[in-house]
Image (cartoon, rainbow, N blue to C red):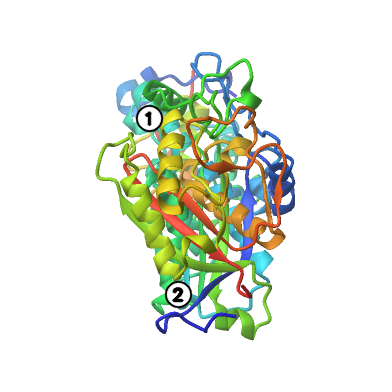
Amino acid sequence: MRPASRSGRERVVVTGLGVKTPAGNDIKTLWSTLVAGESAIAVIRRFDPSDLPVRFAGEVADFDPGAYLGPKVVRQTDRTTHLGFAAAVDALTDADCVPADPARCAVVVGTGMGGTASFYEQIRKLIEDGPARLSPRAVTMSMPNATSAQIAMELGWRGPNLCLATGCTAGTQAIGEGARLIREGAADLVLAGGAEAAVTPIAIAGFAQMGALSTRNDQPERASRPFDALRDGFVLGEGAAFTLLESLDRAMARGARIYGEIAGYGRNCDAYHVTVPDPQGNGAVACMRLALDDAGLDPSMIGHINAHGTSTPLNDSVEAKAICMVFGSRTPPVTSTKGAIGHLMGAAGAVEAVASLVALGHGVVPPVTNLTQPDAELHIDVVAHTPRTGCHGSVLTNSFGFGGQNASLVLSLVDD
Amino acid sequence: MSSLWVGTRLMRRRAATGPDKEITGVDRQKSLAVLQEAVAEVLAIDAGAVVEEATFREDLGADSLDLVEIVLALEDRLGVSLPQQGLKDITTVGEALSWVSDNYQAAP
């Protein structure tokens, strides 16, 4: 075991995980889908997508918010909050947590758009029925911080409560910033994760207009194919994932099961373009190096990379280039969770951190779903077809968002 | 419900439609049923709990936003617009019933 702390700081570990994803609403189901290289992408079921240029997505199925929240709260909150709260409670339950001082229990939630479906519905009402018919909850259902507020209210957690709305980077940043709250001594327990339920006409049409989405309407299950030569855009997904963070000392004192350590965290910004990544990959390179430095690890100690890997032509090529700049010509095995479940926006990084921690525990790297024709222009070792076994060492997981925000986490087993 | 309550936006205001009409016992019962349904939906409680003596805040657990939602739910059911101040100065279900009756002109 490494020393109790690096430069005297608290070591932060993950002792609980919870997910609500298109590929399953528990860790076991999600993991089996990832390892099998299956796809959870299908034609949209929640509304009629006939008029949209893209008619498929990754939707969470068989989810009953009433199993987690009272009927009144279910009515008063957006699906983003339902999914986020449920995943957070699952993580807390999974951690089998002993009570802590509520003033030192924190919540950090990443989301790209907040309660998009509710906002859309209220805008429709405003235009069609007028301002007097608007719900008094139009704002509270839609605001990005609704999920972090609801988690705090339901659990009575009165410590730091943050919401990061940094687009597709938000879920990763939530876990990184959550770990920092413990390192800084501001909290003892942190529920950190991401939630997004943006499978809505406005988001689909908006991303489609940007040219960011795959348009493979005839084969939805084949549409998300990170690092594949035939990739044509990302696939929108919804869901949530949460981690329960605490200090290593606290976790060990209570004999908790430890999934892994948040060993390093880096975040920065491309400051280049709102959607196009810096073509040189400078922001991504610097971000990965920040996370490695924070963990005190050499690139050679990384066992695999869970890439941002969106399946857009540009992201995947710039990310591959950046990985080569950090790791040299022989990169660690690279996977992307998005081939199986699509891009969960503000929840993506949180789901990927969870998947990375489970992979770390198994020493197995899931393949990238739909990677049938690796892009010959990309000089990275992408895991295809079957899981890669015997991958020891830490995981580096990346998120790069529209807006140019980047975040990387280094996750390690504590007995490394 | 709408056949019982032939309310339209044109005849919604007492001021616009003339003097109060006597609310008969039957109308009051129908008003109560509509109110109970709206309150039960918004607060996600059993309609049986929505009795005239019940207070919105203490007994039924309503907050200020719920009271606005109840007005919207009543408007949906009655097909009328109700006054802007809504239920905010109202304490009990019985008072709300009178308020609804006062502000709703039953069809002839």
Where residue A136 sits: x, y (%)? 39, 43
**Which of the two residues, A157 or A173, is positioned nearer the viewer here?**
A173
Where residue A80 sits: x, y (%)? 51, 44
From the image, tell me which residue sits under label 2.
A182
Where residue A5 sits: x, y (%)? 47, 82
**Which of the two residues, B74 or A222, is positioned nearer the viewer here?**
A222
Say few, some or many: other residues with alpha carbon within 10 Å of mark 1 (under 14 / 14 to 19 / 20 or more). some
Q: Is residue A207 above or below residue B72?
A: above
Where residue A77 sits: x, y (%)? 51, 46
* Residue depth check, mark 2 versus mark 1: number of the one nearer the observer: 2
Amino acid marked by disc 2: Ile
- Dot 1 falls on a residue whose secondary structure is helix
Q: Quadrant of the C terminus of chain A?
A: bottom right
Q: Is residue A403 left or right of residue A229?
A: left
Output the chain of dot 1.
A
Label of residue A123 in the image: 1
Quarter of the rendering containing residue A141: top left
Residue at (35, 43) in percent of width and height: A281
**Which of the two residues, A106 or B25, is positioned nearer the viewer here?**
A106
Residue at (44, 35) in percent of width and height: A317
Amino acid marked by disc 1: Ile
- Dot 2 falls on a residue whose secondary structure is helix
Label of residue A12 in the image: none
**Which of the two residues, B30 or B75, is positioned nearer the viewer here?**
B75
Label 2 vs label 1: CA separation?
Answer: 40 Å
Q: Is residue A2 above or below residue A338?
A: below
Say few, some or many: other residues with alpha carbon within 10 Å of mark 2 (under 14 / 14 to 19 / 20 or more). many
Indicate which disc, 2 or 1, sits on the residue closer to the N terminus. 1
